[in-house]
Image: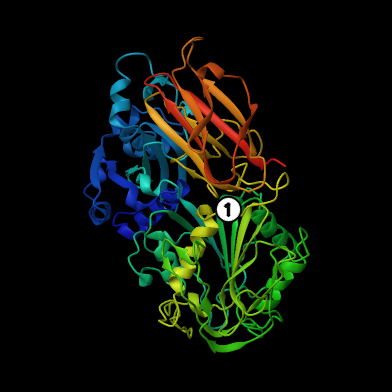
């Protein structure tokens, strides 16, 4: 399709939002909007730039035609005098393409990145940067192109009608939001059946398609919009929805496959999961993912298919193909409690009760169910919110429960009323439990999401048998880890030791520091722990005597080992280090790169095993 004159701001914005989502960015990161000079005066383009405060630029057909691009079109050249607009405009405004042209209705989109001014200035003096200019025939130096965005990126959206091009320069998210937690909300199991509206937005899979800069729960349409907007506004979350008609998968190639997310939220499912879907969820958790399950009361079969959320949950727990013997240490009770205000445990340092979004004192039940705990099946299970009068050290009457399984984490909530914000699609009978003063439901939902995403404490294990690190192979993205922007990546420019993801520190060829860290607890009574990892040092340095670029490994604030460009090898080499002591410590990898020649430190399959 071609964009006709008068294309609206909303139509142009939808394409930009979709493209930004592919590089885990939002319109908040856009800095410049550029277009073929003849189109800069169009109302839709001007309105879009003005609405977001973007600088508006224009390039001549000659300037665009001088760019070295992947795809050239004779039709476009005949119309506007240049064989490319999307990719050419991105390169004219930036430096390196990281997302080739994507085609949307009436719009094509490409994403490029640039470098900070100090990098640009350095390319014209001193030692060569090992990076050719745009017109030289080398399209991208893929070895150093870290996905997603190393400094700033350029988004180019080309409107293919009368030769218009639209380009946006996007900057890296601020350092405070460098680690983005990826959350997938399920809508594949009839979560909007009957009076339910358990979605964060009607725009699916990307809620930013409805409003890219939400300010309140009404910015998005859905009874869970308050939850979604609260996460979005932190700048530390990337949210998606699995739409109706899709299947839950893990380890596949789809963009909505669980391997691409840190947390999976299932809000009151009303369709029985398939065998493959149950296995996918269990393997996702086992590999380090966070699973947030919200159920309702017995008999809450909203779509009248013979199964309610309680039955669906228990089927997952007992018939999943991975562990059918109470894997999380709880079962969901078949009961219906009409109205109570459950009470939270005293909490202490529990990251869900005393988390970054406030202290949790209790919740609400407005027709819900409870859980029964089985600590002999899973010692990590913990009831956090209990029915009034229940023994908080017992096994019955839990209303909000957490647990761990493999390297992952699980939370279950016995009622959908607390997450209902009272807004949503017309025709539904909704209740504002999110803001009900009888509970601290917002804090409970948000703290639990944060903990599930991997920012809470770890669970100590027994000596010699338990893996202390979460997400050892990085296949669940940043789950369990704190890392600089772009460090944990599935970029094909550096091979993984196993799987698709790895941690890639440095590789810029300029003064730079990258860090990768995870806080763990080494059990008391053990003889310390063994830190093992696979390391690939890839460098363009030619010296055999000087360590210009270094990777330092620390625990307890003490250096365990240091590697440098002098340790370069053609592939991965396994390293093993001894970590003494017990208690909580941070395992930290710090890569420090010198001023000119690039060195990459690539880590994979990092484990920490207590010594017997």
Is residue 392 left or right of 354 when viewed as pictured? Answer: right
Asked if 127 appears above or below 491 in the picture, the reply is above
For the C terminus, which image quadrant? Answer: top right
The answer to whether any part of residue 562 appears in the image is yes
Q: Between residue 319 and residue 20, name the one nearer to us.
A: 319
Where residue 196 sits: x, y (%)? 53, 79
Seen at 71% across and 77% down, the residue is 311
- Identify whether 120 is placed above or below 398: above
Where is mark 1, residue-wise? 458
Q: Position of residue 55 (x, y in %)?
A: 23, 45
Residue 29 point in image, percent of width and height: 34, 48
Does residue 165 appear in the picture of this structure?
Answer: no
- Check the image and name the residue furthest to the bottom: 338
Q: Quadrant of residue 189?
A: bottom right
Classify 83 as above or below 365: above
Binning the other alpha carbons within 10 Å of mark 1 as few (below 14), some (14 to 19) or many (20 upward) gives: many
């Amino acid at each position: 399709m071609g964009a006709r004159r008068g294309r609206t701001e909303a139509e142009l914005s939808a394409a930009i939002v979709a493209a930004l989502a592919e590089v885990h960015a939002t319109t908040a990161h856009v800095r410049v909007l550029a277009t073929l000079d003849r189109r800069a005066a169009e109302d839709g383009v001007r309105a879009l730039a003005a609405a977001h405060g973007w600088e508006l630029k224009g390039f001549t057909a000659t300037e665009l035609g001088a760019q070295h691009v992947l795809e050239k079109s004779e039709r476009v050249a005949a119309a506007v005098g240049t064989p490319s607009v999307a990719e050419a405009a991105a390169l004219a405004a930036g430096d390196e393409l990281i997302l080739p042209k994507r085609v949307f209705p009436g719009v094509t989109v490409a994403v490029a990145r640039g470098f900070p001014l100090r990098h640009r200035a350095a390319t014209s003096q001193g030692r060569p940067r090992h990076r050719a200019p745009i017109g030289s025939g080398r399209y991208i130096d893929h070895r150093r192109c870290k996905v997603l965005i190393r400094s700033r990126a350029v988004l180019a959206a080309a409107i293919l009608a009368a030769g218009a091009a639209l380009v946006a320069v996007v900057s890296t998210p601020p350092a405070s939001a460098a680690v983005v937690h990826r959350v997938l909300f399920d809508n594949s199991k009839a979560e909007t059946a009957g009076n339910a509206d358990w979605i964060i937005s009607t725009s699916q899979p990307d809620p930013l398609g409805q409003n890219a800069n939400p300010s309140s729960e009404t910015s998005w349409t859905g009874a869970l919009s308050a939850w979604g907007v609260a996460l979005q506004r932190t700048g530390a979350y990337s949210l998606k929805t699995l739409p109706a008609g899709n299947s839950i998968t893990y380890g596949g190639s789809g963009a909505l496959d669980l391997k691409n997310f840190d947390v999976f939220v299932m809000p009151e499912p009303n369709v029985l999961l398939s065998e493959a879907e149950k296995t996918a969820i269990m393997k996702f958790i086992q590999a380090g993912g966070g699973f947030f399950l919200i159920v309702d009361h017995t008999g809450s079969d909203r779509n009248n298919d013979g199964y309610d959320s309680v039955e669906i949950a228990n089927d997952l727990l007992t018939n999943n193909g991975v562990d059918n013997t109470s894997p999380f240490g709880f079962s969901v009770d078949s009961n219906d409690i009409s109205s109570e205000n459950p009470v939270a445990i005293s909490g202490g340092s529990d990251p869900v009760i005393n988390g970054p979004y406030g202290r949790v004192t209790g919740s609400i039940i407005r027709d819900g169910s409870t859980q029964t705990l089985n600590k002999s099946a899973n010692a990590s299970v913990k009831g956090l919110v209990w029915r009034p009068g229940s023994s908080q050290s017992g096994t019955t009457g839990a209303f909000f429960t957490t647990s761990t399984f493999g390297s992952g984490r699980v939370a279950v909530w016995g009622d959908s009323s607390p997450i209902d914000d009272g807004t949503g699609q017309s025709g539904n009978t909704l209740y504002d439990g999110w803001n009900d003063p009888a509970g601290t439901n917002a804090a409970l939902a948000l703290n639990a999401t944060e903990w599930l995403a991997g920012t809470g404490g770890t669970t100590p294990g027994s000596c010699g048998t338990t893996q202390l690190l979460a997400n050892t192979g990085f296949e669940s993205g940043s789950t369990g880890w704190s890392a600089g922007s772009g460090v944990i990546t599935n970029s094909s420019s550096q091979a993984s030791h196993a799987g698709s993801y790895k941690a890639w520190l440095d590789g810029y060829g300029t003064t730079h520091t990258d860090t990768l860290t995870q806080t763990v607890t080494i059990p008391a009574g053990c003889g310390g722990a063994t830190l093992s990892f696979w390391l690939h040092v890839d460098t363009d340095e030619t010296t055999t005597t000087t360590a210009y670029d270094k990777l330092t490994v620390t625990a307890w604030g003490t250096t365990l080992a240091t590697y440098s460009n002098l340790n370069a090898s053609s592939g991965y080499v396994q390293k093993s280090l001894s970590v003494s002591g017990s208690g909580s410590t941070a395992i930290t990898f710090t890569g420090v790169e010198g001023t000119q020649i690039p060195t990459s430190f690539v880590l994979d399959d990092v484990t920490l095993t207590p010594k017997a």
